Image: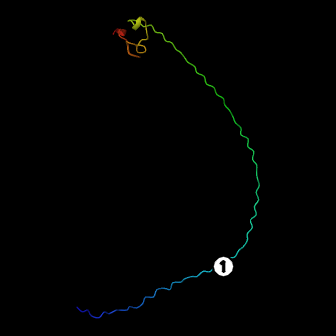
Amino acid sequence: MHCGPKTTNVLPAIVHPTKCCVNNTFQNNIVPHIHPTHTTTVNHVNFQHQHYFPHTNSNVTQVTNQQFVAGGGQAPGGFGGPVGGGFGGPVGGGFGVPRPGFFGR
């Protein structure tokens, strides 16, 4: 197979805007600056006032006593106790629970 002659087309050139470059040069000049300083020492004296507040504690135990006359029935151990069963002995069961034999039970 034989191909025909190749043709190359040359198109018109595209001209872009000119790029501008800057070349900088520098020259150093020395200008002396003098900055004098002065130091003052200040001595401080401080008084620390310490305040003390001694405190004591004391304990007081208050003891109360209640006596009741319990009628009708026999309390455990053969002597009267508070109505309502006392502190939960063998019969009664605790505060506010009547013992058997009280109030017609």
Where residue 99 sits in the image (x, y, percent)? 37, 11
Residue, disc 1 = 27
Side (left or right) of 93 relative to 27: left
The total of numbered circles placed on residues is 1
Q: Residue furthest left?
A: 1
Q: Residue furthest bottom?
A: 5
Q: 10 Å neighbourhood of mark 1: few (<14), some, or many (≥20)?
A: few
Where residue 61 sits in the image (x, y, percent)? 55, 18
Residue 20's place in the image compared with 66, above or below, is: below
Side (left or right) of 102 relative to 15: left
Q: In the figure, residue 52 lies in which quadrant?
A: top right
Q: Residue furthest front?
A: 1
Residue 22's place in the image compared with 105, above or below, is: below
Q: How is the image coloured?
A: rainbow
Say which element carries label 1: loop
Q: Which quadrant does the C terminus fall into? A: top left
Which residue is located at x 41 percent, y 5 percent? 78
Residue 55's place in the image compared with 13, above or below, is: above
Which residue is located at x 73 percent, y 43 percent? 46
Q: Amino acid at mark 1?
A: Gln
Where residue 36 sits in the image (x, y, percent)? 76, 63
Which residue is located at x 38 percent, y 15 percent? 93
Q: In the figure, residue 1 lies in which quadrant?
A: bottom left
Side (left or right) of 75 relative to 50: left
Where residue 37 sits in the image (x, y, percent)? 75, 61
